[in-house]
Amino acid sequence: MVQEYYKEDESQVGYRVSLIATSFGISQFCTSIPWGMLSDRIGRRPVLFFGLGSTIVGVLLFGISKSYAWALLSRTMCGLLNGNISIVKSMVSEMTLENSVAQRAQAFSFLQVVFGLGGIVGAFIGGYLSNPVQKYPNVFGGGGLLTEWLTEYPYFLPCFLASAIASIGWIAGFILLEETLVTVKHNPTNTLSNGLFSNSKTNAKYNTFTSNPPHSLSVDTWKNGTFVSSFFASLTKPVIAICITSSLVTYQNVFYDELFSIWTASQRGLGGLGFSSSNIGTALSFSACITMTVQLFLFHCLTRRFGSLRLYRSVLFISVFVFVAQELTYYLYEIPDIYGKTHTNFWVWVGLLSGLAAKTVCQTIAITGAVLLLNNAVTRTDSLGAINGFSQCCASGMRAFGPATCGILWSTTLSLDWISFPVRTYLIWAFLSCVGVFTLLSSNRLQQVPSSTLRERYPSSTIEAEESS
């Protein structure tokens, strides 16, 4: 899309694309905490449905954009009016208060599975349905109002289909989804010394509407004006440390994703792979499949085996080497394929998908692990949504900062003509590797939840795994 707005100067495409991605992150940075606080007061459902409805409208507006400014504004609107990520995390945490660490890990994995499924569907929709008149003239090139509309707005069809899917989700959620926020007027705010998952029984059944829940929100907190102070009281050192580390994980993840799109789409003469939008969509769909596989079958098993913190640090360590090796894919064009021909993309695909798979496994575990560690570390129940909003605010800041720095560094490094071509194309990957090292070092400040707390509710096998970390 952006390439069509700046055909005269293709070198600016990466910078302009990064601005669109940055606008969404900046918007969420400004509104994540307020949305989280509002959900702590009025409930998760109304905030969730408002955010999803705003996204539906914003995506449609994005599909009918005819200028860069329109596309930028529509993405900004989506970010400002949607705080659903932190809301959903809070809901999952509230639904699993009575479960073990491994079970909570599996529950948060399902949340990431949804993201992975969206990545699969979204990548295919965006890659294969954009410019439908040019790609499928036999279907959409027959003339008439539909052809004229899709020619005038070549990106409307994928946006319309995405909005339609989101609308089905809105209706289904409105009918089936129950409120998870519990308010009890006569029960004071609970302050838990070892996190939200202490003082509860493993086999107790979670009930959203129980009259005497083990963890509840005090409505009086709002009436006596102490909610803001309770929010700051919840920002303990463990919570802040996890937010910092998870923000760095988010930064390196979005930086990689932005770099991957620019790098694969750029011409080989500019250090890219020269892939088409369909090829990029296929690669991203492959990544989404890996994400779903990890979340469904791998993450909770590894958490039970190694413990959440030990596993978290391990994948951060592996990620550094993945970033170091990714740029080497560019040189696989020189290796003969199975037919003895060079400059084919056979080995490029092998190297690209291998690196993408390793990155996806590590970053998926790291992102989900950070969410689990954060929700386990929260010590108050009256500000869970606000704390998740704070974490999302930090992550959104990195989602804004990551694409911006990626686009700037990509354009800057390519313009350094006094540096040899192989070196300047590798500089941006070296920078990402350094970020990975810094993230790994920052994780040393994290602490595992005490096993004495876990013994009150978790099986011995889980406790042993946690202690081994």
Image (cartoon, rainbow, N blue to C red):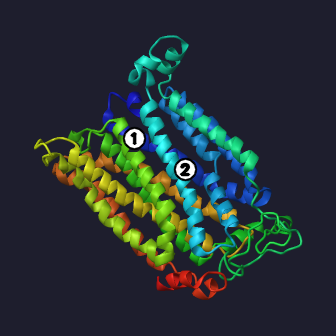
| 311 displayed left or right of 208 | left
| Label 1 to label 2: alpha-carbon separation | 26 Å
Residue 20 seen by the camera: no
The residue labelled by disc 2 is 26
The residue labelled by disc 1 is 281
Relative image position of residue 417 (x, y in whole percent): 19, 46
276 over 88 or under it: above or below: above
Relative image position of residue 444 (x, y in whole percent): 44, 78
Callout 1: SS: helix
Residue in the picture at 50% in, 82% down: 465
| 390 displayed left or right of 135 | right
Camera-side residue of 317 and 19: 317
Q: Nearer the viewer, mark 1 or mark 2?
A: 1
Circle 2 residues within 10 Å: few <14, some 14–19, many ≥20: many
Relative image position of residue 29 (x, y in whole percent): 58, 54
- Look at label 2 and name its amino acid: Ile
